[in-house]
Image (cartoon, rainbow, N blue to C red):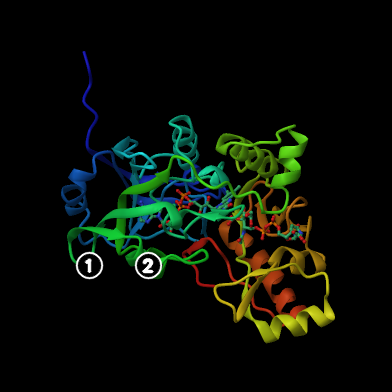
Amino acid sequence: MTTAVAPWSLTENASLQHLNTFHVTAHAPRLLRVADPAALPEALATVVGQAPLLVLGSGSNVLIAADPEGTVLAFDNRDITILEHRADHAIVRAGAGVIWHELVLWSLGEGLSGLENLALIPGTVGAAPIQNIGAYGAQVGEFIQTVEAWDTREQAWVRLDQDACLFSYRDSVFKQDADRYLITAVEFRLPLLNELRLDYAGIGEQLDAMGIALPVAADVANAVIAIRRRKLPDPDVLGNAGSFFKNPILPLEQVDVLLQHYPQLPVFPGNDPGNRKVSAAWMIEACGWKGQRDGDAGISPNHALVLVNHGTASGAQLLAFARRVSASVLETFGVPIEPEPRLIGARW
Ligand code: FAD
Ligand code: EPU
């Protein structure tokens, strides 16, 4: 006998402690879980007038500073389908609730490439387009063909192609217009043979250490996984949301002046020839914050960009600590740094 899965369910006064990787204590008046996106309009109708709506995936890029007021929406659709298989690429569709790293492993198992540098990024497929997740020389937007979403403004289903998503470093149309688009599925165009990206610092050394001279995509994923496990704290052990600050993108003239004073500041290509991305981690470490803590809020001893919860810090305490870090970077370097995660119940 099979038991039919309900297309959606609603819980009152739901704990969000396991829905945020800082593991701060928080509650939502209602948690709406949707397993079948076709039922989304009907499910939303039950909470109409009880806006605002906040979508959460795994909560690995949010800092909950105060309880959300409205309904939290989470997607449980975890289907992965190959829509088209061509000689040189495949079109793959994944539900919003699929765990990102599981999609990466699945795609490599199918002989598809492209996502290998993005292995082990926490979170869900539905959240991946929001900040155009990126790591080790790749960004997901390069491989996204279409994002399918419910447009809450137009009250209609929409399909946004890659250009309409306005992807850039840690940004997209979805981040700029938060909560307008409820992403239900993402379609990827994945090459059968991707040109491997081995340039990012550490990948070559890691492959050498693994004794791999002629890597395939799965080897690159394994190298990235090893580097990430070494550098970044596991949120199940130490609450965190990955990089808490974005690397600032600054005009070339400002970068030249900074480099005259701080020749060791790591500098990377920016959005265009007139600007550069500079390392926020280096500036935070230079200000002495790496490994510091105040109560249970602190900066990871392993990576200066990672704000951590050593136990029972509240979202407000974590935010207050982050503000002290950013104020000292501004004072020392004259560079404002901004949070990467979405702040819930607070403004930066
Ligand atoms: P959430 O944190 O739940 O949500 C993030 C944002 O997306 C929120 O604004 C939310 O409202 C919105 N959202 C979520 N799902 C949907 C949906 N279906 N429709 C519409 N809006 C939605 N990020 C990187 O880019 N690169 C990294 O290398 C990286 N490393 C990390 C390492 C660690 C240890 C951790 C904890 C985080 C890291 N992150 C990294 C950040 C995080 O993993 C990504 O931003 C991820 O995409 C968040 O997914 P999520 O499901 O947890 O989203
Ligand atoms: N560095 C320091 N101190 C540190 C850590 C790093 O000085 O404690 C310097 C080093 O010189 C290093 C440079 O910063 O060469 C860059 O470090 P890393 O390669 O770790 O990259 P990052 O800029 O700190 C970014 C992303 C990460 C992503 C990595 C790898 C942002 C905000 N962060 O970190 O993404 O995994 O590159 O591509 O762009 C995230 O977004 O949550 C995240 C973890």
Mark toward the start of the polypeptide (2 vs 1): 1
Q: Which residue is mark 2?
A: 173
Q: Who is closer to the viewer here, 151 or 145?
A: 145
Q: Is residue 259 above or below residue 122?
A: below
| Residue beneath disc 1 | 153
In the displayed structure image, the side of residue 188 where residue 212 appears, left or right: right
For label 2, count other residues whose C-alpha is less than 10 Å away and answer few (under 14), some (14-19) or many (20+).
many
Task: Count the labels in the image.
Answer: 2
Which corner quadrant of the image does residue 318 belong to? bottom right
Of the 4 image quadrants, the one containing the N terminus is top left
> Is the residue indicated by label 2 positioned so its CB lies within 8 Å of ligand 1?
no
Task: Name which quarter of the figure residue 180 lies in.
Answer: bottom left
Reply above or below: 149 against 283: above
**Side of 1 relative to 329 (left or right):** left
Q: CA distance from mark 2 to mark 1?
A: 14 Å
Closer to us: 208 or 292? 208
Cβ atoms under marks 2 and 1 closer than 8 Å: no
Q: Would you call the spot at circle 1 few (<14 residues within 10 Å), some (14-19), or many (20 or more)? A: few
Check disc 2 and give the amino acid type. Answer: Val
Q: Residue at x 64, y 43 (%)?
A: 224
Secondary structure of the residue carrying tag 2 is: helix
In percent of width and height, residue 288 lies at: 82, 65
Residue drawn where x is 63% and y is 61% of the image = 317
Give the number of the mark in front: 2 or 1: 2
> Measured from the top left, where is residue 66 in percent x and y?
48, 61
The percent position of residue 344, horizontal first and vertical second, equals 47, 62
